[in-house]
Image (cartoon, rainbow, N blue to C red):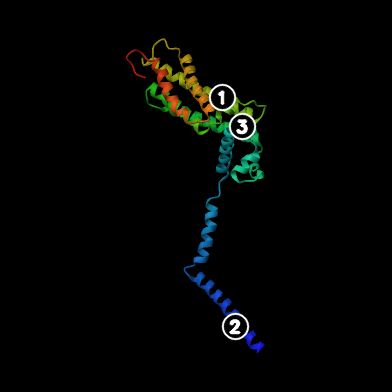
Amino acid sequence: MWLDSYRSITKRQTGIFSGTKNANTSLDKGAGIGHHAIGSFSTMKTSIRKTSRDRRQEIEQTALDLAYIHTPQKVSTGMIAARLGLTQPAIYKHFSNKQDIWRAVGERLAGEIRNNISFGTKSQATPVSTLKQLVSAQLDLISQNPAMPELLLMRVEAGGSADCQVTIQSAIADFQRELEDNLHLGVKDKTFIETLNVQDAALLIMGVIQSSILRMIVRRDPGVLQKDGPRLLDLLLAGFVRKGEKA
């Protein structure tokens, strides 16, 4: 009797395993669904893998984001790695150290400032419109990277942080010269008063940008840049124009 019971149990188990095998076989044959799903998943993983350039840019932006929250001095490669869900060795694959990251950040921000300058240089707009475009673009850049002013203000030693500051300051100097050139054009086409000192006028425009930045730092709100900056610039330019002209 026990032998009959054993045979019955064995038969049922064989049927179960056989059914599972048949089900798997059907899945494989069902338009290749099983293999197709695995293949798609593999392809998906490959497609979202970041290039070295993309990863570097992601690390740079994360360093900037953390710098605004914690100040640049307190940002570490460990914090950057944790924010991105990476290990520190993964960061070092792209940058030798934190100073190397700040150096790259400086080059990137300086490049964006010069891109804005280039746009202003090629513009066919009036000098007044070009001045407004230049300032608006600069305010946009800072609102998107609100740690930039703190990078310029932090105390640094020789190395990446110092290089970062020098690189950005050089681009800002170019930006100020572009303001002077457009102010000079405004004097030349008789939009601005003949006695306007373009160097002083450019300093005043830089003062509008800097005062807006200061309010942003105090309020911890990048939104004030585009809220207040253009309005204050309009007020300033109105004092430069000839009587009867509009800024």
Give the secondary structure at mark 1.
helix
- Residue sitting at x 57%, y 80%: 15
Residue 95 location, x and y as percent? 63, 39
Three-letter residue code for mark 1? Gln
Q: Are marks 3 and 1 in contact (CB under 8 Å)?
A: no
Question: Which labelled disc corresponds to residue 169?
Answer: 1
Q: Residue furthest bottom?
A: 1
Three-letter residue code for mark 3? Pro
Figure quadrant of the C terminus: top left
- In the picture, measured across the screen, residue 184 lies left or right of residue 243, that is right
- Residue sitting at x 34%, y 12%: 243
Q: Nearer the viewer, mark 3 or mark 1?
A: 3
Q: Is residue 141 above or below residue 80?
A: above
Looking at the image, is mark 3 or mark 2 earlier in the sequence? Answer: 2
Q: How many marks?
A: 3
Residue at the disc numbered 2: 11
Question: Which labelled disc corresponds to residue 159?
Answer: none
Task: Count neighbours of disc 3 (C-alpha within 10 A) and say few if under 14, some if 14 to 19, many if 20 or more.
Answer: many
Residue at the disc numbered 3: 72
Residue 77 location, x and y as percent? 65, 39
